[in-house]
Amino acid sequence: MWSTGRSEAALEAALPVPIEVLPLRSARRLRLRFDETSGMLKLTCPWRTSRRSALAWALDQRDWIEAQLARAEPSEPFSPGAVIPIEGADVRILWDSSARRTPILCGNELRVGGPEAGVPRRVELFLKRRALDVMSAEVSAYSAAARVTASSVSVGDAGTRWGSCSSQGRIRLSWRLILAPPNVRRFVVAHEVAHLVHLDHGARFKTLEAGLYGPGLSEAKAALRKVGPRLRRLGRGR
């Protein structure tokens, strides 16, 4: 569903990187690519496509854009000594071979033991468990407010989506959201819970989403666009 009711300047400003719109007489559809050399998006479109419509379509591809940006930047493995965000707060991974293997979060330190080679895997498992526990509770709270029930809640790592809700009421969320600030994470949770009632992005959906989340919805959306590319890089191998 294309973004509507926004000016060309507002649409372009909402994109995380500059964009070049290239109308072509030979183009039969809109195509978007990310040029790593220039750091720009390149959008080709049919000759008669308006610039505003092209920008609106590009903005609706934000998940794909974030995935491309994440791949273009260096990865950030969960290695000993690395500083990573957990719920938006910087935490340093401290490895001690004599410590217990299961990571323990102590203030701004994530302490983990066992063989060094297994540190990244143990940190990721810790984050996935934490993500599922935290977001399951949030799904339950938002669902109660919406007077619906999710049939299941799970976490995964889809390349271009932060969350999904099936017609059977199954909600799946990116475990990487546990790395994001709480307001960003709760926005995605509220968004997917709203889909339990409305599977589209129409006016009723938006009203419910805003009612569930409360004040600061637009700020949370903007923050996700800002931090999203890094969240996708975290924990990737070198």
Image (spheres, rainbow, N blue to C red):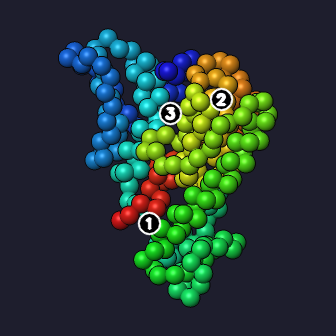
Q: Which residue was labeled with disc 2?
A: 196
Q: Is residue 25 above or below residue 189?
A: above
Q: Secondary structure at mark 2?
A: helix
Q: Which of the 4 quarters of the picture holds residue 113?
A: bottom right
Q: Are marks 3 and 2 in contact (CB under 8 Å)?
A: no
Q: Earlier in the sequence, mark 1 or mark 2?
A: 1
Q: Amino acid at mark 3?
A: Ala
Q: Nearer the viewer, residue 199 or 152?
A: 152
66 or 6, which is in the foreground? 66
Residue at mark 1: 77
Classed neighbour count for the residue bearing mark 1: other residues with Cα under 10 Å, few (<14), some (14–19), many (≥20): some
* C-alpha distance separating marks 3 and 2: 31 Å
Identity, as a three-letter code, of the amino acid under mark 2: Leu
Measured as percent of width and height from the top left, residue 149 is found at: 72, 34
Please give the label number shown on residue 127: none
With 57 as the anchor, is 162 left or right in this view? Answer: right
Could you say where residue 219 lies in the image, as x and y percent from the top left? Answer: 65, 39
Residue type at numbered disc 1: Pro
Residue 9 in view of the camera: no
